[in-house]
Each structure stands twice: as C-alpha cells, then as structure tokens.
Image (cartoon, helix red, strand yellow):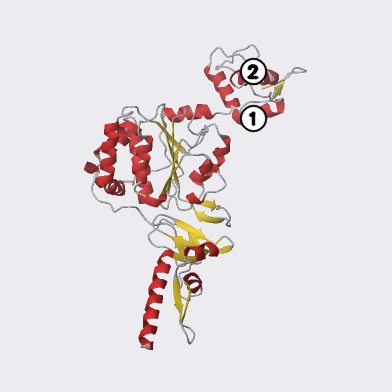
Amino acid sequence: IQGIKMAQMEDANAKILLELNQIYAVAPVGNKMSIINDTEDETRFLTPADFRLALQNRFATDTSGKNPKQVQASTWWLTHPERREYKSVDFLPIAETPYGVFNMWKGFAVKPKGGLEDIPLFHELIDEVICSGSEQWALYLWGWLAHMVQFPKEKPGVAVVLRSDAQGVGKSRFAKYVGSLLGRHFRTVTHGRHIHGNFNSHLKDTLMLFGDEAVWGGDRRTESILKQLITEPNMIIEMKGKDVFEVRSYLRLMLATNSEWAAPVGLTARRYFVLNVSNSRKNDHNFFKRLIYEQNHGGIEALLQVLMDFDLSDFEVRNIPETPARLDQKFLSMEPIEKWWLEILSNEDFTVGGKILNFDDMNRVAKADLLYSFNEHTKAYKPNHRNWEARRLCFQFKKLVPFAMDKRRGSGPREY
C-alpha cells in the first residue's frame, strides 16, 4: 500500500512538473533572473514574489524524506532539477530557435489556405481604396506585406503611412485585416506615448505595429524614435520595476492619420511610403461589414497564402514609389531654411536685397540680404521665429547650397 501511495504521489508530481514547464520558465532578463509566464496571448516576466502568489493555492509532494509532505508548488518547481530554463530571451521570427534561447515568436495565427479569389473585398480595399487605383502603388504595398510574411527576419526599413482627410475610409480596417495574420505579434496603439514613451514592453514581441492617430508629423519628439523603430536592428525593452534588456527588432510600422502632416519625411528620407487613401468607400457600412465577414470566414488564411505565393524575385522593399502624398509630407517636414530656399527657386517674383535671382547667370548677393530675407520669410508663417544670426545662416546655407562661393569686392559687404 505504501508503494502504491508513493507511486501515486510521484505521478501527481510529474503531472505538476509537466504543467508548470508548459507555462513557466526561468531565464535572465537584464541583470536579474526572471520567471517567464508564457501564455497563448502574451509573454510576461514575473518576479519570484509574483510567481509564488500565482501558485499560492497549488501544492506538490516532497518525497525526499521519510515522511512525504505537501509543499508550495512554486518552491518545489523552482528547486526542481528539470524545471524549464533558458540562457537568454529574444524575439526571432525563424523556424529553428538557437539552443538555450527562449523565443517569443509564436508563428502566424493561422495556416495558409485559399487564394486571391477568396478575398475579393480585401483585394478591392488594397487596390482601389488604400492605393487609390494606382497599380504601381498597389504592387509595392502587396510586396511590402509579402516581405513581412516571407522574410519576417529581414527588417524592411520602410514604414507605411496611410492618411486621409476623413474618417471611415478603411485605414484601420485594412491594418486589422493584415494584423490578424500575426495574432499576438500585431499591436495597435492610439497614443504617442506607446511609441515614444519610456515603457515599451508591448513591443518586445511585435512584428507589426499599427499607430492609429498616434503620430503627428510635426512632433519632433517622435522623429528619432520612429527612425529607430523603422531601421534599427535591435531594441531596448524597458518594463516598470525590471531591468532593461535587448532583443532583436524586426518590427514593421504602419501609421494612419487624418492629419495633413502625417509623418516627418525629410527631403532625402527613404523611410516612408505615404498614401492618400481614397474616399470611395467612406462610411460604406455594408462594404466593411462584408469585409469583416470575409476576414473571419477564410479570408485570413487566404491572404496568408496569397502573400506566401507572391513573387518577390524582382522586388526591393527599399525602392519606394514616389507619391503625391509623400511629396506633401516632404514639404510639410521641411526646415525653415529649406522652405525659404524653395520659395526663392519657385517664385519668379521673390526678391533678395531688392533683386530677383537670374537663373541664367551668376548672382552676387550680400550675406546680410540673405539673412534679412530668410528671417522675414520665416516670420511670415512662423510668428514665434527668433531671428537667426549670420553665422548660423551661413553654416546652414552652405550645406543647402554647397556650390555657393564666399566673395568680397574691395571694402564692400561679404557676398555669396
């Protein structure tokens, strides 16, 4: 009888070990050991105190002594030689995880099945609405999505920006349809602090981040953070009350907004593919209702199959098509000196020092006249502009117009 009881207790312990090993693991996070709580929906990092609290009502049997006794399952598991443990934590969207690494990547949410004929409404949404009927833009966007599916471990370095002047045109519905392929690896944020704030644990295992009205192009605080999210291969994760740690970043960024200034797109920036979304399905509730039905009845699986089959042999994700929306963002994102120089080049009546520049001849302009022209032009649209000094203007002007020559005639003023 004693032997049977002992066998039953060992069986019960084995079941507890199997169950806890499926849910929990021990791994270093930053400079501290942490307990990983791995569920279907998310990966959490628990302190030993949180772990013990979670298992306070669970018990195992300590059979090491003469008289078996019940002990807290948390303590028993932590001291068990066969507990699940890893040497590091990372996010690697690959099929084979390196030995000793806890991989937060859980794969796609569905299995691929079907084809383009099974997603006619999504096909219309991306081609006719999101890309406004442009074959070139649609081809690039299909390729961008297929690159995410076929090469998730290759960071594209390009964000997709969807803007419109009205709500209800389909931007969010498009992002959520695509995001449903990724399950827990898709995140939607609606506040800028969830992109540029200190605490970013929600990004630790995100493959696609959708910022819905979370970014404004004129917010300089977000500019450097967006650049890092779009291009940097690594990401520092910071959680409240825990050490920071680094993971590899394969994040794709998609932004949607109704603002005119959607993203900080510099003159030479190659990080943004910007689209003005068509109003053709604005507030078409019947269309979007049918789209959601399609998504939930085989559409996700079919879209995944289409993207996996998409031919990327001649596709380069960094070759972004120029769009009118992107040009608008470039103009809005210009620095004051760039806007002033563009005005000189494009306005035939614009005078500097009482003269209009002659495009067919060499021009001589006093630096003082350039300085006055710049400050007056900038104050006209930016009343709080503080006048630049000559040194600052000359430094910036030489970067903008590197062929300008510094000259002086006799005792006259210094000129370009």
The mark closer to the camera, 1 or 2, is 2
Residue 136: give x, y in percent of width and height: 34, 34
Residue 157: give x, y in percent of width and height: 46, 44
Q: Which residue is mark 2?
A: 376
Q: Nearer the viewer, residue 412 or 253?
A: 253
* Gap between marks 1 and 2 measured at Cα: 17 Å
Quadrant position of residue 145: top left
In the image, taking residue 362 as reference, residue 192 lies left or right, namely left
Q: Nearer the viewer, residue 377 or 243?
A: 243
Callout 2: helix, strand or loop?
A: helix
Query: Vertical placement of 138 versus 324: above or below?
Result: below
User: Can residue 112 be seen in this snapshot?
Assistant: yes
**Of pointers 1 and 2, the one earlier in the residue sequence:** 2
Callout 1: helix, strand or loop?
A: helix
Q: Residue at x 69, y 18 (%)?
A: 366
Q: Nearer the viewer, residue 275 or 32?
A: 32
Q: Which residue is mark 1?
A: 396
